[in-house]
Amino acid sequence: MTTEQRPRPPRTLAEELRSRGDEELTALLRARADLLSPLPGDVSQLATRAGTRASVVRALERLDVFTLQVAEALAVAPQPCPYDTLAALLPGGERELPDALARLRGRALLWGAEHEPRLVRTAQEVLAPTAARPGGTGLGPTVAEACAGISPRRVQELLTGAGLPATGDPVSAVTALTGLFADEERFARLLAAAPPGAREALDRLAWGPPYGEVSARPGPQLRWLLDRGLLLPTQPGTVVLPREVALRLRGGRAHRELRPRPPEVTARATYTPGVADAAGAGAAQGALGVIEELLTGWAAEPPPVLRTGGVGVRELKRTAVALDVPEPQAAFWAELAYAAGLVAGDGEVDERYAPTPAYDAWAAEPGEWRWARLAGVWLTGTRVPGLVGDRDGKGRTLTALGPGLDRGPAAELRRRVLELLAALPEGTAPDPAAVRDRIGWELPRRMTPEARDALCAAVLAEADLLGVTGRGALTSYGRALLAAAPADGGLPADSAPMGSVPPGSASADSAPSAGSAPAGTGSAPSAGSAPAGTAPAADREAGAARLLAPLLPEELDHFLLQADLTAVAPGPLSREPAQAMALIADIESKGGATVYRFTPASVRRALDAGWTPDALHGFLAEHSRTPVPQPLTYLVDDVARRHGRLRVGVAAGYLRCEDEALLTQVLADRRAEQLRLRRIAPTVVISGAPPEILLARLRELGLAPAAESAEGAVVTLAATRHRTPPRTAPEPVPDGPPAADDRLLAAAVRAIRAGDRTEERTDEAATAAGARTGARPVPPPPAGALPRTPAADTLATLQAAALSGDLVRIGYVGADGVAAQHILAPVRVEGGFVTAFDHTAEEVRTYPLHRITGTVELPAD
């Protein structure tokens, strides 16, 4: 192809975007979802928004190390940058360079001719090295930039010192000095004449940072460098190594270490898939038990909500002791239950955390479904329990369930770590250091290195705790959770809070998606559904649950009583026996089998909760596969015989007992002095302490008192099951909009293309343009009466059109009462709204169904 035949390169980013095909624009909007909100009116607006600083920074954060290194090299190269010049800056990455440039161009960070690409100006400004931020290259300013603050006379002196003839103006002097440093042979001759120590001074600054300090009277080697422009002053006492000099010292390399290929994720250990699945299933069973134990404890003794939100340090420590786990793990389990909507604040004046009604529905489900719900929430959540105990930017301590724990990249990073595990052969446990290195290569700017490494380690540890991995290897049901996960790392937008909708069902009255807006606003299409090719969250969880179900041990309704006042449950107990055993016995050890111990205190606890001795005997006989030991029978009868002989009521407090000797014994006990007891009748003693204090202290003395009502009846202190009003689980807080599906992206591209059409075009020109772009001409809506159809028919017509891609004409009455007709290409119909490309307004709009009077199908031609 001759020079005359070569296509003219685009002169602006907008011009290049306009020349791209619909598939390329769709790929851009998928990779940079923030460009969709709000929807650009045309390609010029799209290019402008793609060049804004916030959007460019977000796009740069999602580049891998090598692509970012290419962008950094372009930022310090001339614009436009010849391909050969760029390749010389990146020696060793020539094979991967075309793909990296394609990624930059696809994300609208690069434009121009293939042989002379240009970096978007905003990206240049973000990546260009400065004194405060040398950047990844470690290069300083150019000679021209560094000489901008130097007097013309001094510039001429530098030229003379370098052995060049003086020029008539500083611009040509700077050009001559730059040419000297760019010429390899002349630069080598100049440096060969340097005094001892001068080259060492340059080498210290060559790879950055390029700034150094000098005294008021520098040594001879530094003076020699300063007099020849090899070091240039920036401010008193500070010098900088010009970019051209640094590149010459580096041999033309922009980076000290080029990393064109991702590091390999190596294996730490290898197991058979069955071993990994079995280990993971055991952890999953343990996770369900811990969550139930946590919420059962919080139902009996709800922890208070701090004034700033969250659970206090003391309450978290108490919870950790009750669960027999370290405090960081207690924070993790509490956060997981909170994210799943199983626990929340009760909203009272003295607010406390308690289980929600969703917990009761969750607890009634099979074990595999309960686990799948927890795992789904963990996978998509943005809260980071590992931050509990750290301090925020204002110096406040971060607490479990409190504010400040959301980190937008957490869900993306968590999913990516599991995807790396899924890429390994089944049963392979990766080296954690290799996983951290790989994530660091893929997302170098996403978080600080320390935060990213800590989150990677937390993901691996939490996956083992939850049973997503077994012995470090991803389980088969863990792989099912990742089935058809979004390739771009975006959050699946269909992941609803667990406990709100039963598995596999959909809410008929769900609220409109976050992207929905009233008709006529011209808002961006909602991204409320999963991207194409992504399995819905409910389906992924269902698949994981089906794979996990055969691996979980069968729930038992029996245990084995032993003569030493213990009971052994050889497997997980079903819910009712487990709740009863937790009340009448103390858990002594956990594991594959649970050991319970019966004590006077545990039996008294059951009697306080309303159990009778006969009920206790009956329960033990019914659920034990071994005969009830005689010591256990004696223990129950003995505690029951003493239970309630001593009665506590309200005076502030009083004791009543038919056994006068027992009251005398209590009065004589020195340990009861603080209760301030005083006998007012042979069988009655009053106290200044309230009843609850009396009950607690007398039980500490080994007695078995019971509370009584004003009528003298024994009050059953049944365990109160605290519940909150219905609560909605907290939504994840991603740091960007979720990815849109293919149909919404196609509608957005059509809207952008439509915005490029000018109003001066005739109908024939518009038809021709539609033929070129593949769009069919759409007739204007006819004047006259609005279409009117029953609501059910309207909904069915719109849903069918959304599936087939056909056009429909609707009648619509706006909020202002104005009636109009619109021709729509429906994209999605859900939650009482229809999102469609409105051919009448030539943009994507969302209409509430209740304002649509009727629909008319348009012929396919």
Image: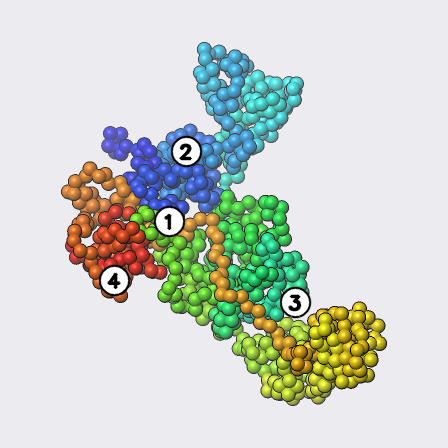
Residue depicted at x 40% and y 41% = 104
In the drawing, what numbered circle is on residue 322? 3
Residue depicted at x 39% and y 68% = 505
Badge 3 marks a residue whose secondary structure is helix
**Few, some or many C-alpha atoms within 10 Å of disc 3 (few <14, some 14-19, many ≥20)?**
few
Q: Quadrant of residue 331?
A: bottom right
Describe residue 59's horizontal placement relative to residue 351 as left or right: left
Residue depicted at x 56% and y 29% = 210
Q: What residue type is labelled 3?
A: Ala
Residue depicted at x 23% and y 48% = 840
Q: Which amino acid does label 2 sit on?
A: Arg
Residue closer to the observer: 52 or 225: 52
Q: Distance between the residues labelled 3 and 1?
A: 47 Å
Describe residue 462's horizontal placement relative to residue 760 as left or right: right
Mark 4 or mark 1, earlier in chain: 1
Q: What residue type is labelled 4?
A: Thr
Q: Quadrant of the N terminus?
A: top left
Residue closer to the observer: 615 or 139: 615
Q: Which amino acid does label 1 sit on?
A: Arg
The residue at which mark 2 appears reads as: 121
Q: Are marks 1 and 2 in contact (CB under 8 Å)?
A: no
Q: Distance between the residues labelled 4 and 1?
A: 31 Å
